Image: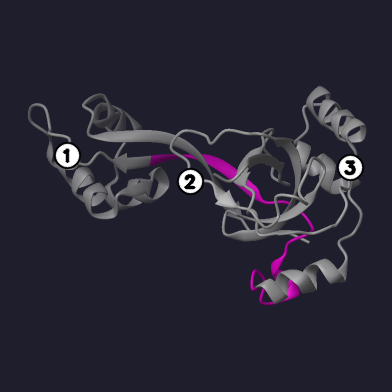
Amino acid sequence: MSELVEIAIPVPLRRLFTYSVPEALAPRITLGSRVAVTFANRKIPGIVVRTGASAPPGVTVKPIAGLLDEEPLFGPELLAFLVEAADYYLHPIGDVLRTAAPALSSAAVQALKKSGFLSRAGELKTKGRVRTKTVLAIRFVAGAAPVGRLGPKQREVLAILEARGEVLEPELAKIAKVTRAALGRLAELGLVTLEEREAEIDPFFS
């Protein structure tokens, strides 16, 4: 099984994100390494902050796409200091590390293009940060039997979810004009599961 690590990504969230380390990169990736990952349909650099991580429940862990520097950008002491400073000042660690990191070399970008991860250099977003918000993901529970009578709106929502498997609340609200209370009732009946998730709301800015 691939090793899992936690990576700091430049998003306005005070948390880390779990990725798996491909076997070919395992000997070269360590604390402080700058790597390329996919996040919210974007290709961006991140910094490995913790190793030996565990997969979050219900989350499909994506693999790291590539190593951007042969040597770690931050040694253990400096990395620990920056993490502590970000925590003390209540600032997203991904932003702190992005600001402290040197510019990315053209050789690293060319290597990612050669691997097929990038089709052009501009795909790797090294400026700004991803803007996200927390949304509710509603997932259909296959095989669950309705308890009691369901209203027309609840049946409509279940039909959409059965066809799609999972829908984010903003989209579902537009399609079926369903309320958070109605979703909560379906969850209480065991017909759907609700999970908070970060979703991209705006593109990167330069």
Image quarter in which the N terminus is found: top right
One can see residue 204 in this view = no
Q: Position of residue 154 (x, y in %)?
A: 19, 38
Which residue has dot 1 on it?
Answer: 143
Contact? badges 1 and 3 (CB < 8 Å): no
3D distance between C-alphas at marks 2 and 1: 22 Å
Q: Residue 74 has which mark?
A: 3
Image-quadrant location for residue 133: top right
Q: Secondary structure at mark 3?
A: loop
Q: Which residues are magenta?
A: 116-137
Taking the spot 17% from the left edge, 39% from the top edge, the residue there is: 143
Is 133 rendered above or below residue 107? above
Q: Position of residue 146 (x, y in %)?
A: 12, 32
- The amino acid type of the residue labelled 3 equals Phe
- The amino acid type of the residue labelled 2 equals Thr
Q: Residue 60 has which mark?
A: 2
Q: Nearer the viewer, residue 172 or 161?
A: 161
Q: Residues within 10 Å of mark 3 (few under 14, many from 20)?
A: many
Q: Nearer the viewer, residue 72 or 191?
A: 72
